[in-house]
Image (cartoon, rainbow, N blue to C red):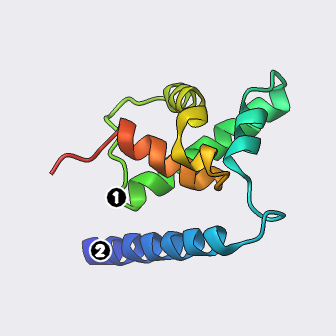
Amino acid sequence: MIRFFKKISTMAAVSLTLAVGYVSTANSETTLSARNAYSLCTTEDMDWINFCNGLIQGYADYASLSGNACFPTGTTRTTLITIYIDRLPSSQAYNNNESALVAAVEILSRAYACRG
């Protein structure tokens, strides 16, 4: 049973890695830019707040599963969103107009670096 879960998690990590490779080569019409994510996630509208909650949860899951970030137990989505929004405008990905996912990995891996 444990072997099964290890295979599933490995497959998920590989799938997500391939998805990120696709996102980085996708055109601007299919990729959410870091700048657009900042605009959406700072809009005081319940629909966009809910969108941003789901967005950051997906980004946090990817960052964790790919080994780019290690979140302490009890880290809340509110904390993740606050860190993401506060640090997004000063991120390299934002300044280079890269995808919101690339920015999230950059920000979350710095805020929640995995310790050897």
Q: Which residue is label 1 attached to?
A: 67
Q: Nearer the viewer, residue 12 or 29?
A: 29
Q: Nearer the viewer, residue 95 or 61?
A: 95
The residue located at (76%, 43%) in the rendering is 36
The residue furthest top is 44
Left or right, residue 91 beside residue 26: left
Residue 24 against residue 38 in the figure, above or below: below
**Dots 2 and 1: beta carbons under 8 Å?**
no
The residue located at (65%, 45%) in the rendering is 55
Residue type, numbered disc 2: Met
Q: State which tag comes first along the sequence, 2 or 1.
A: 2
The residue located at (41%, 30%) in the rendering is 75
Q: Residues within 10 Å of mark 2 (few under 14, many from 20)?
A: few
Write down the quadrant of residue 108 in the picture.
top left
Q: Which residue is label 2 attached to?
A: 1
- As measured in the structure, the alpha-carbon distance from the residue carrying label 2 to the one carrying label 1 is 23 Å
Left or right, residue 102 beside residue 108: right
Residue type, numbered disc 1: Gly
Write down the quadrant of residue 3 in the picture.
bottom left
Q: Position of residue 49 (x, y in %)?
A: 75, 30
Left or right, residue 16 beside residue 67: right
Q: Position of residue 43 (x, y in %)?
A: 80, 26
Q: Nearer the viewer, residue 55 or 35?
A: 35
Q: Position of residue 31 (x, y in %)?
A: 74, 61
User: Which is more foreground, mark 2 or mark 1?
Assistant: 1
Residue 61 against residue 8 in the figure, above or below: above
Q: Residues within 10 Å of mark 1 (few under 14, many from 20)?
A: few
The residue located at (45%, 76%) in the rendering is 14
